[in-house]
Amino acid sequence: MEKKTQISVILTNAPGELSKLCDVLKGAKINILGMSIQNAKDSVKELFNIREKTGRRIALAESYRGILKDSSDYSLIRLFVNEPVKAEKILRETKYLLDTEPILVFRFENQPGVLGRVAKRLGEAKINIDYIYGSAMEDAKESIFIVHIAEGDLDRVKGSFKDL
């Protein structure tokens, strides 16, 4: 496990926008090692549905509809790249809206149960997982997973996963 930097980019939700972003990174010889794409509208819908089901909805449905309308124009792209400092610089220069934050990167043997052991250890330490993305090809020996937890919990996990 390594602590690395993730770049989150807000893109207009339109055909060709991801291609333009990839071309900017390619031009700077930056390799994308992991990516997650989330349509902002879908996130708002999920939040509305969860709050509705749990009885915790505090805003009126009309408020959510307004947010849905506004959010349908954007997507959130989370990037794990080989050179995050260089990527941040070039993306800012080309006027992308972005943010950076620390993440945990796990590379482990591609076998059933390994990700579950990571989740279990974090749970036992009372550390909440905000989100995970990653993958491996079916016949690959190694998998990679990017895990986001609260920044205040990052130092608590040092040395906790050396045996995985």
Image (tube, helix red, strand yellow):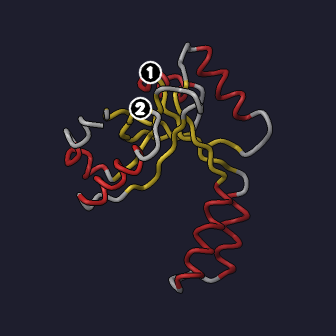
Q: Amino acid at mark 1?
A: Glu
The image shows residue 65 at horizontal and vertical percentages of 71, 72
Label 2 SS = strand
Identify the residue at image location x=59%, y=34%: 96
Q: Is residue 152 above or below residue 32?
A: below
Q: Are marks 1 and 2 in contact (CB under 8 Å)?
A: no
Residue hosting label 1: 83
Quadrant, the N terminus: top left
Q: Amino acid at mark 2?
A: Glu
Quadrant, the C terminus: top left
Using residue 52 as the reference point, say whether residue 89 is left or right of it.
left
The image shows residue 114 at horizontal and vertical percentages of 40, 43
Mark 1, other Cα within 10 Å: few <14 / some 14–19 / many ≥20: some
The image shows residue 157 at horizontal and vertical percentages of 23, 45
Closer to the camera in the image, 1 or 4:
1
The image shows residue 162 at horizontal and vertical percentages of 24, 35
Q: Is residue 20 above or below residue 145?
A: above
Identify the residue at image location x=65%, y=48%: 75
Label 1 SS = loop
Residue hosting label 2: 109
Closer to the camera in the image, 118 or 83:
118
Identify the residue at image location x=59%, y=31%: 137
Using residue 98 as the reference point, say whether residue 103 is left or right of it.
left
Res. 24 image quadrant: top right
Q: CA distance from mark 1 to mark 2?
A: 24 Å
Mark 2, other Cα within 10 Å: few <14 / some 14–19 / many ≥20: some
